[in-house]
Image: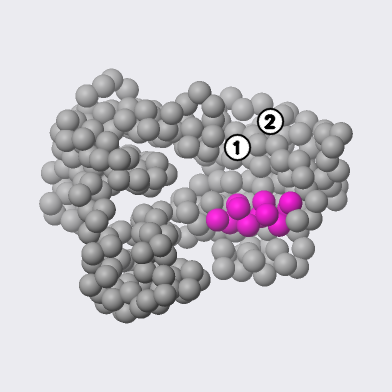
Amino acid sequence: MRINPRQLSQNLNRGLTPIYVVSGDEPLLVQECCDSIRVAARQKGYDERELLHGEHNFDWGTLLAAAGSLSLFAKKKLIELRLPGGKPGDKGSRALQEFAGIHCDDLVLLLVLPKLERTQLNSKWIKALEQRGTLIQVWPVEAREMPRWIHQRLRTLGLEAEPDAIQILAERVEGNLLAANQEIEKLKLLCAGQVITAELMDAAVASSARYDVFGLIDRALAGDADRAVKTLHGLRAEGVEAPVVLWALAREIRSLIEVGQQLDQGQPIGRLVRIQKRQPLVQSALSRLERRQLEELLLRARAVDSAIKGDRGRDPWSGLLELTLNLAGKRSV
């Protein structure tokens, strides 16, 4: 079964399926889908949760072993497997197909993946999982849809806003749903019980404009490490959440890899980077960082993501500082 995030609540109300595959590159929506599935599983008595990270050299026997082991204190189990690379390889493909063949009412698998390409959607392992369960494809909210998305979020929290106010916020966050959600949570505290006017919205979002994640990215791309680090510290001091900063850094690194590949194929920079003022910034970064280095930065970004999600012994902000310096070309990768 294949559904979109808006259909998930109704789907869960009808009962759990043995497998859930959540795929997409929009962190907020992916996280909310996973949260909904976890809550529904707990309500159905799946009290044990085992978290697996399918990183490089992952032992796929661990997945099948997890399916065969229940604790003494839980009768039902949720296995959550995060596969940041999105490609399980031959061993993983076989293990996932084997898991799909397990018929056990006491197990639910939650597989979290980045956006799946068409070839992956047609793969045997995805088809096997989808046949037994539910595939939720999370798509980015396009710029023209952003005002409607913000309006729905506000109404969910009991807030009303003028159309001009909604447009101000949409332009401010530039498609970053994590940043938009953070601003909406702030509005819930500041503007409860009143209609949010354009003036109120402008004042609310301006209060966090001194240090913004997009300024951080531009300074790092320009190789201005000192100002980039100052901006990062400012974001932290102003209460910006680490996932928002990581989202911006990881998105930019992925974009640099894609742009670099297409430049090598002879594509003009003007076609690849539409905003003219950003073109020299992107070219500056690509002149410092090779593809191998950018791919290494993506791996480090995944380690920061693990730290944000509670991996002990890792400080997310230290990881974000390292990423910022690497992007600015001040430390070797």
User: Which residue is disc 1 drawn over?
Assistant: 88
Q: Position of residue 302 (x, y in %)?
A: 46, 34
Q: Is residue 152 left or right of residue 45?
A: left
Give the main secondary structure of the magenta stretch.
helix
Tag 2–tag 1 contact (CB < 8 Å): yes
Amino acid found under the numbered disc labelled 1: Pro
Q: Quadrant of residue 67?
A: top right
Residue at the location (23% across, 33% down)? Answer: 229
Please tell me which of labels 2 and 1 falls first in the chain: 2
In the rendered view, would you say 95 is above or below 159? Answer: above
Residue at the location (70% across, 37% down)? Answer: 50
In the rendered view, would you say 166 is above or below 86? Answer: below
Q: Is there any visible trace of residue 87 in the rendered image?
A: no
Residue bounds of the magenta highlight: 32-42
In the rendered view, would you say 330 is above or below 142? Answer: above
User: Which residue is disc 2 drawn over?
Assistant: 60
Nearer to the camera, 115 or 315: 315
Q: Quadrant of residue 179?
A: bottom left
